[in-house]
Amino acid sequence: MNLDILINELIIYGINKQLIKDTDYNYVANRLIALYNEKSFIKLNVIPRQLHLILTDLANLAFEKKIIQSADVVTLDNFKAKIMDELLPKPSEVIAKFWSNYQISPKMATDYLYKLSIDANYVQAYRNLQNESWEYQTKYGVLQLTINLAKPEKDPKLIALQKSINFGYPKCQLCIENEGYQGHIGYDSKANMRIIPIVLNGEKWRFQYSPYSYYNEHSIVLNEEHVPMVINEATFKKLIAFLDLFPHYFIGSNAGLPIVGGSILSHEHYQAGYYHFPIEDAKEIFLGKYKSVDVYRLIWPMSTIRIKAKDKNELIEYASKILNSWQNYQNEKLSIINSKEELHNTITPIARKYNDMYVFDLVLRNNYTNAQYPDGVFHIHPEYYNIKKENIGLIEAMGLGILPPRLKKELLVIEEILKGKITKIDDSSMLLHKEWISELLENYDRNIEPAKYIRIEAVKRFQKMLECAAPFKQDDYSIECFNEFIKNVIN
């Protein structure tokens, strides 16, 4: 690998993507050779390859030259981010350009930042293309699954080492101090990240994109302060404020309680993006009006109330009434256990705007545990852990299941079993699928391709996982109780 060729490739890529200008050529080249402790550079006319190939070679060369001391995925990725930072405008320049574009349209502003994030290799576009996705029509409508292959799996020894390191700065992966942070063995670099300051309900927040996108323009909206996740009336006000800023995006929040919350509960944040989720097409059962607010129960695997109004203040008022009523609700017959001493009830809120109509989908959650279900009564039940054991979070609640990378290999093995090419399971990692494989073999329709059949059945399993997380199930008594709960809040 020739360093001069690689640097020329990268600089020409940067010029082509309008990250830098021709007049920046010598400056950027000198900045880059300094990273490799080189004293000279030859300008060459080359045709750049794809960015991920250029960066991979540059990072590997840094390891060969002992510029970096390890070839683990975090160290290599951190060095790639450091390289790309040399081609990027300063945060203040990005912010100015974003708001300049915003004066033309909010979408033009987000389009600019999203393209910049991809061109900067912060949004891992090449890796994101490796995700495997499919969908299937269920009784609730289409449900979607994706195997997350974008985020590289870390070596167990590296994970153990990371857990043993406590640097304390930044406090977490979402803190604003991450912007420009170089990272280290225990922490992913954010050197090539750019984030935009916004104001939500009088509070200072930031807007950025997620490096590993689970859907189109997957973005993170984060509080400038390192404060814990919470769902309250102010949450609804902040979601509405975001929609007023970016009406073409949806926005939602994970619940603030363990088990039913997301993976990061220590820092208040929301997720947003430009994507049409399955829940948007769920059938609605109209149950009444509260002032100008239309109230519906959704035909959806999770217990969801949809409310719509043009008056955002009345929508916020009614959403707050639902939250307050749910936080005080208990139904022992349905195992919905809750108390003032130990709050188990909360909401996963989702917000969208259609023209001048605001829409909230309020997903009722409960994190009570008992001896039978120590991981959560309304959590995925153990018989489905072979597909996914992690929390049902915001994205899953909207009908998009994020599956672990291990399933790519495991589904291929199950496919070979259905074909009769494997008759005995020798791999211990496949034992968790034993019961599901028996079900698949028993019901297999040989007119369907094995790969397609397995994926259809995986979606059906995902549907059942969502149903596990619903406090109000699909039986007549549960639906009656759900309707009664909603109507009591209307009156």
Image: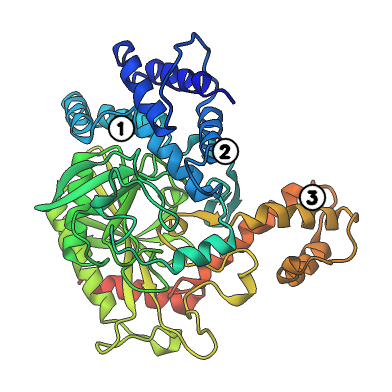
Determine which of the numbered discs, if any, sits on residue 450 in the image: 3
Q: Quadrant of the C terminus?
A: bottom left
Q: Estimate the spatial distance between the alpha carbons at disc 2 and disc 1, rounded to whole Å.
A: 34 Å
395 left or right, relative to 225: right
89 left or right, relative to 429: left
Residue reaching furthest left? 202
Three-letter amino acid code at the position of disc 2: Glu
Which sits earlier in the primary sequence, circle 3 or circle 1?
Answer: 1
121 left or right, relative to 345: right
Disc number lying in front (2 or 3): 2
Determine which of the numbered discs, if any, sits on residue 64 in the image: 2
Q: How is the image coloured?
A: rainbow
Q: Residues within 10 Å of mark 1 (few under 14, many from 20)?
A: many
x then y, percent, for residue 318:
19, 63
Residue highlighted by disc 1: 113
Disc number lying in front (2 or 1): 2
Disc number lying in front (3 or 1): 1
Three-letter amino acid code at the position of disc 1: Leu
